Image (cartoon, rainbow, N blue to C red):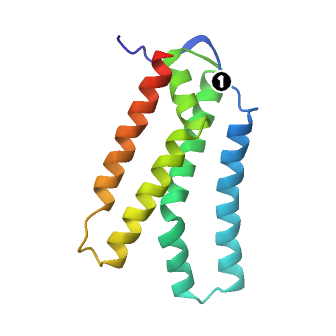
Amino acid sequence: MSAAAPGAGGYDLTLATPGFYLLVATLALFVVMLLLLRTSHPRRKRGFEGYLDAAGVSLAFLAFSVVLVLSLALEDPHGDRTDYALYETIVTGYWLAFAIPVVTVASSVQARSRGAIQWFLPAIGVAVVVFFAVLAYYYAA
């Protein structure tokens, strides 16, 4: 099975799906929480650090996901199997539902142990492996 480069194909990649709306709404909620924290408590450094400890990983995954889905849907609204597999991997949320909590917990453990427990990079590696496993599942479907 050779993977085709993304391009025109027979799969509709629409942004008008509940999964995409939920993805954008979740990202927006995190951003609103950050803005609310910064405006209501502008000098609370520990509050901001706590927010970043808890939400930093989630923000990164959500932002990456929104950019990827937007890029796919706008560039190739009728994508091929590779486009479709990438789109479904993100929009269905299975990968994010696994990767965000695993990497967030690993990040927190490493931060709270002041780096003595090195879990962050291995957790990112696990998230990448799961991403490609879910991608392969949708590519084969």
Residue 84 appears in the figure? yes
The answer to whether residue 56 is above or below residue 122 is: below
- Seen in the image, is 119 located left or right of residue 133? left
Residue at 68%, 39% (x, y): give it: 20
Residue 6 appears in the figure? no
Q: Position of residue 42 (x, y in %)?
A: 64, 85
Residue at 51%, 86% (x, y): give it: 46
- Seen in the image, is 122 located left or right of residue 74? left
Classify mark 1: residues with Cα within 10 Å, few (<14), some (14-19) or many (20+): many
Residue underneath mark 1: 13
Place residue 107 in its image quadrant. Answer: bottom left
Q: Nearer the viewer, residue 13 or 95?
A: 95
Q: Position of residue 133 (x, y in %)?
A: 39, 31
Q: Name the residue furthest bottom.
A: 43
Q: Position of residue 139 (x, y in %)?
A: 47, 19
Q: Position of residue 35 (x, y in %)?
A: 68, 72
- Seen in the image, is 61 located left or right of residue 120? right
Instruction: Check the picture and name the quadrant holding the N terminus.
Output: top left
Provide the secondary structure element on which disc 1 rests. Answer: loop
The answer to whether residue 20 is above or below residue 81 is: below
